[in-house]
Amino acid sequence: MTPLTNEDFFLLHTYVRQHYGIDLHKKKLLISSRLSAPVAQLGYTSFHEYVQDIISGRRPDLINPMLARLTTNYTYFMREEVHFRFLQQTVLPMLEQKHKTDRCISIWSAGCSSGEEPYTLSMYLLDYFRDKGSWDTRILATDLSNDMLFRASQPVYNEENLSSLPPVWKKRYFVKGSDGLYRITSELRSNVLFREFNLMDPIHFRKKFDLICCRNVMIYFDQQVKEDLVRRFYQATVPGGYLFIGHSEGLNRNSCPYEYIQPAIYQKKE
Ligand SMILES: C[S@@+](CC[C@H](N)C(=O)[O-])C[C@H]1O[C@@H](n2cnc3c(N)ncnc32)[C@H](O)[C@@H]1O
């Protein structure tokens, strides 16, 4: 396998940034170390042919496995719990008032990976509205990676995966099988709608959102891609709605259309 040349590196990172927003322009070593073996396994003798197959669009099947090797899908239940406390104490009481007539809440987990984020949101919603009659609390959960979405749609967890959850939720939303592993209840499963969606694409969902949760996703994007995405999120948020981002992903206060509420929490003012 011949090494990754500067030219092929340039073509590949430019393609990935343009199509998926992911900025790899300082990651030559990472690309070369993470892709060399799988590219050779595919039968390529040089990166050049592989890169040509990707950027020409001849081999769309190579994209997802490549992105999976170059980014992380790391996620877990209750990640950055401060968001969920804010959801429970501030957002949900506000939404209960706001939607008392239509009884329909609209939440988007954008970049949901294997589903722990939308399932956590969903447990909070189901719990909050449990004794309040019939509410539509379904969450839209999207990701670029269809492997992750497949995993999210039929997840299996071990004891450790669920260790951050309150014991009562473990009982209420999970069923332990004879193999010692946990599967989610149909109530929790049916409250999350998984869809493949590239955040670089125009956002044309039927409804605007009361809350968009896009955490630990924009960390891969350069400033311009990030600012553009935040503007599109803003258009897709209802007045009074919120944006949650990861705690390590600051937004530029001068260009951000949302109002800053507290670290990693923004609101579109009424
Ligand atoms: C680290 S995970 C974050 C999961 C979850 N939001 C959390 O905070 O735990 C990042 C996810 O962003 C997804 N992602 C990266 N670029 C994307 C894009 N352009 N469109 C949609 N999803 C993207 C990846 O596939 C990955 O599953």
Image (cartoon, grey):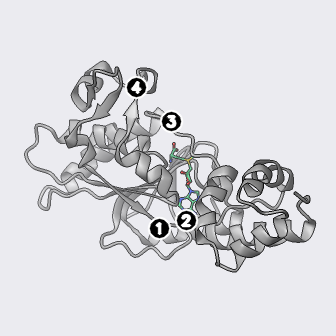
Whether the residue under disc 3 has CB within 8 Å of ligand 1: yes
Q: Secondary structure at mark 4?
A: helix
The Cα–Cα distance between marks 2 and 3, rounded to whole angstroms, is 20 Å
Relative height, residue 263 to residue 232 (above, below): above
Q: Secondary structure at mark 1?
A: helix
Residue identified by numbered label 3:
80
Residue identified by numbered label 1:
234
> Which comes before the other along the chain, label 4 or label 2?
4
In this picture, residue 86 sits left or right of residue 218: left
- Most extreme residue toward the front is 43
Q: Are marks 1 and 2 in contact (CB under 8 Å)?
A: yes
Whether the residue under disc 2 has CB within 8 Å of ligand 1: no
Q: Nearer the viewer, mark 3 or mark 4?
A: 4
Residue identified by numbered label 2:
230
**Camera-nearest residue between 270 and 34:** 34
Residue identified by numbered label 4:
162
> Which comes before the other along the chain, label 1 or label 3?
3
